Image (cartoon, grey):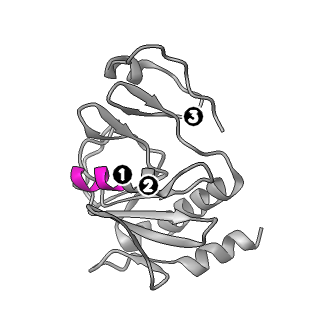
Amino acid sequence: MATQPAFDHPVSVEEYLATVFEHDCEYVNGVIEERDLGEFEHAFLQGILATFFNNHRSEWGVICLPEQRVQTQRDHFRVPDITILRPGAPREHILTHPPLLVIEIQSPEDTLRRTAAKATEYNAFGIEHVWIIDPTARVGYRGTAFGLELARSGELTIPETPIRLVLADLFAELDQV
């Protein structure tokens, strides 16, 4: 896991945006928040998901961006593991318009409470679809304005689109390595 930069004072948005981090950090209300990453399951699933969406890019009309900064509020910058844009979405250095989907992959240090709060923030910003993948528990969740909803069907989908992720298939890929 990367170490969090040491700041003994609140950091301005400008200072956050001008700082180079070894692994991009999130920014919430003047506080730099380290992102949990770097473990095998997390990295492997992130790669599989990026490949999955990129392989369906033309068919589904989506653009897949791993670790893209998203400004959800004036002083909140999040870095989802995977961000999926709609066709025709504005090309922005830092996204200020809600994407179609964000995906967060749980790391052992993540708590579902923290991830649920982040999902609520994403929904409040206008992101319609938030998926959370937990490789340890081998489950997926949909983030809602009210918290996390377990994907009991074993699938994560975006209604009225062909976008569909079968969790058993995803975890089978993980088991093959």
Name the N-terminal-most of marks 2 and 3: 3
- Mark 3 or mark 1, whichever is nearer to me: 1
Q: Residue furthest front?
A: 113
- Mark 2 or mark 3, whichever is nearer to me: 2
Work out which quarter of the rendered image holds the C terminus and state it.
bottom right
Question: Residue 168, image x and y in percent?
Answer: 59, 80
Q: Is residue 99 found left or right of 137 in the rendered image?
A: left
Residue 100 within the segment the image draws in magenta: no
Count residues near mark 2 (Cα–Cα under 10 Å), then give few for <14, some for 14-19, many for 20+.
Answer: few
Q: How far apart are the alpha carbons under marks 3 and 1?
A: 22 Å
**In percent of the image, x 29 and y 79: which residue is there?**
159
Question: In this orientation, which residue lies closer to the viewer: 51 or 9?
Answer: 9
Q: Is residue 34 found left or right of 113 in the rendered image?
A: right
Q: Mark 1–mark 2 contact, CB under 8 Å?
A: yes
Could you say whether the residue bearing mark 2 is in a helix, strand or loop?
Answer: helix
From the image, give the main secondary structure of the stretch colored magenta.
helix
Q: Mark 3–mark 1 contact, CB under 8 Å?
A: no
Residue for badge 2: 113
Relative to 105, residue 174 above or below: below
Occupied quadrant, residue 176: bottom right
Name the N-terminal-most of marks 3 and 1: 3
Could you say whether the residue bearing mark 1 is in a helix, strand or loop?
Answer: helix
Give the magenta-colored segment's residue range: 117-125
The amino acid type of the residue labelled 1 equals Ala
**In percent of the image, x 48 and y 45: which residue is there?**
67
Residue for badge 1: 117
Circle on res. 23: 3
Could you say whether the residue bearing mark 3 is in a helix, strand or loop?
Answer: loop
**In percent of the image, x 28 and y 61: which residue is there?**
87
Question: Residue 129, image x and y in percent?
Answer: 32, 64
